[in-house]
């Protein structure tokens, strides 16, 4: 089968032309070709190939799928890649199998064209803006530069996970609370730069939302409704979804904890 090398500079993964053709043919024909190529298998094989070629994947090469419960179409499926990125079905899907293929298709496209995210961060990255601000870790651009410098040698996928952690901390109000406790931005960055996005962080954020709901009744349901709208809009636009998906999962976890507390109190 003919092959092509994805990426720039002649460095990257070798992929079949049939996979590239998924993204070049008319949209109306793509589902038929997606079935012929079997994008679900192709996506899994792509990540297994990356692992065999030395990519550092903390949780292995397994691609995970999650169907949204629904009794009738359209069906929605999310796929989480070994690097942590998340995508979703972006077409009207009359079957669960079609939803799975749609999610795999957009995930495969991003996997192929973003393979360079496995390259390590190097020094000398230029940031536009005021030099004095860039040298001050307590400014926005300074904090971003500090994060880049402190993560030299790590892959961009690892850096993206760190950025997702800080997006969630900002959304959750945790960064503001730390500043109020006189924690410097540099201290916060140094602490979380070595933390993976795990169940401990999710549970702590969910607990914050439980407390918020108890202080402001209805806050949780309003935030969940807004998050679900944002998630759907981003999914249909074919965007990367991890931040939105993590927000929804944290809010649902908080709702579950509130439900358990109410049940035990009866």
Image (cartoon, grey):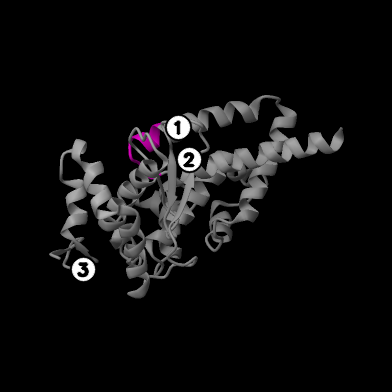
**Which quarter of the figure has residue 225?**
top right
Residues under numbered marks 3 and 2 in contact, where contact means CB atoms less than 8 Å apart = no
Q: Is residue 100 rendered to the left or right of residue 23?
A: right
| Residue 244, disc | 2
**Which quarter of the figure has residue 173?**
top right
Q: Quadrant of the N terminus?
A: bottom left
Most distant residue in the right direction: 266
In front: 27, or 112?
27
Q: Secondary structure at mark 2?
A: helix
**Which quarter of the figure has residue 218?**
top right
Residue 129 magenta-highlighted? no
- Of callouts 3 and 2, which one flags the residue occurring earlier in the amino acid sequence? 3
Residue where numbered disc 1 is placed: 230
- The residue depicted at 87 percent of the width and 32 percent of the height is 266
- Of callouts 3 and 1, which one flags the residue occurring earlier in the amino acid sequence? 3
Residues under numbered marks 2 and 1 in contact, where contact means CB atoms less than 8 Å apart = yes
| Residue 11, disc | 3
User: Crowding near pointer 3: few (<14 within 10 Å), some, many (20+)?
Assistant: few
């Amino acid at each position: 089968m003919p092959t092509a090398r994805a990426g720039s500079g002649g460095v990257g993964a070798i992929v079949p032309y049939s996979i590239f053709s998924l993204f070049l043919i008319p949209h109306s024909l793509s589902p038929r070709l997606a079935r012929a190529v079997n994008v679900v298998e192709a996506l899994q094989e792509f990540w297994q190939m990356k692992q065999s070629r030395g990519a550092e994947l903390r949780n292995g090469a397994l691609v995970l799928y999650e169907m949204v419960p629904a009794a009738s179409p359209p069906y929605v499926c999310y796929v989480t890649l070994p690097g942590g990125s998340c995508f979703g079905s972006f077409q009207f899907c009359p079957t669960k199998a079609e939803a799975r293929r749609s999610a795999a298709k957009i995930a495969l496209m991003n996997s192929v064209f973003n393979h360079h995210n496995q390259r390590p961060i190097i020094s000398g990255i230029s940031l536009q803006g005021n030099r004095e601000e860039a040298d001050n870790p307590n400014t926005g651009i300074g904090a971003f530069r500090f994060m880049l410098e402190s993560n030299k040698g790590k892959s961009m996928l690892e850096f993206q996970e760190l950025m997702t952690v800080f997006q969630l901390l900002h959304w959750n109000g945790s960064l503001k609370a730390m500043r109020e406790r006189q924690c410097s931005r540099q201290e916060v960055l140094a602490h979380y730069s070595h933390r993976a996005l795990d169940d401990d962080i999710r549970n702590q954020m969910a607990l914050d939302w439980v407390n918020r709901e108890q202080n402001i009744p209805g806050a949780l349901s309003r935030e969940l409704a807004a998050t679900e709208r944002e998630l759907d809009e981003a999914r249909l636009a074919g965007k990367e979804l991890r931040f939105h998906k993590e927000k929804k999962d944290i809010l649902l976890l908080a709702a579950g904890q509130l439900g358990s507390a109410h049940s035990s109190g009866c």
